[in-house]
Image (cartoon, helix red, strand yellow):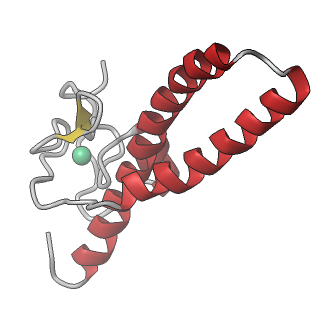
Amino acid sequence: MPGEPSSAAPPDPGGAAPLSTAALFGRCPRCGRGALFHGLLAVRERCAVCGLDLRAQDAGDGPAVAAIFVVGALAMLAAFVVEFRFEPPLWVHAALWPAVVLPVSVLTMRVAKAALIALQWRHRRSAGGV
Ligand SMILES: [Zn+2]
């Protein structure tokens, strides 16, 4: 189960998980096995596998900016395509786009937040950080 302590060998404390693993699967930036999040977007205080302290990691507004610019632009393009191709009544747009945009935005913010935290951890660590 993700986020649970593992009985496997402890990870290399000096290594870093691949960025793709940390970002796409929401994993610890150091070991790549422990869950980074509890809930949708809240970052855990500590990795359950390697014990990395995650309290100082803060992605700021970056994940929200990714969701606004990327998902917003794609949603507008999709709305135009649906409107000009199918000409649905207005209530279809009102029902369709929130159902599509909200989960895609949360997923985008989750991946962006995990990627930013992984990158922050990598670069701060080399400057004598954690
Ligand atoms: Zn870890």
Q: Quadrant of residue 78?
A: top right
Which residue is farthest bottom?
127
In percent of width and height, residue 76 lies at 67, 43
Residue sitting at 62 percent across and 14 percent down?
Answer: 91
Compared across the picture, whether 47 is left or right of 117 comes to: left
Residue sitting at 26 percent across and 61 percent down?
Answer: 60
Which residue is farthest right?
85
Does 7 appear above or below 14? above
In percent of width and height, residue 130 lies at 14, 69
In percent of width and height, residue 2 lies at 31, 25
Q: Quadrant of the N terminus?
A: top left
Compared across the picture, whether 11 is left or right of 65 comes to: left
Which residue is at the front of the view, 72 or 49?
72
Which residue is at the front of the view, 31 or 129?
129
Which residue is at the front of the view, 108 or 17?
108
Compared across the picture, whether 38 is left or right of 113 comes to: left
Decide if residue 113 is in sight here: yes
In percent of width and height, residue 21 lies at 47, 45
Does 69 appear above or below 81? below
Compared across the picture, whether 70 is left or right of 79 comes to: left
Residue sitting at 29 percent across and 30 percent down?
Answer: 40
Q: Quadrant of residue 49?
A: top left
Residue sitting at 78 percent across and 17 percent down?
Answer: 88
Q: How many marks?
A: 0
Does 85 appear above or below 50? above
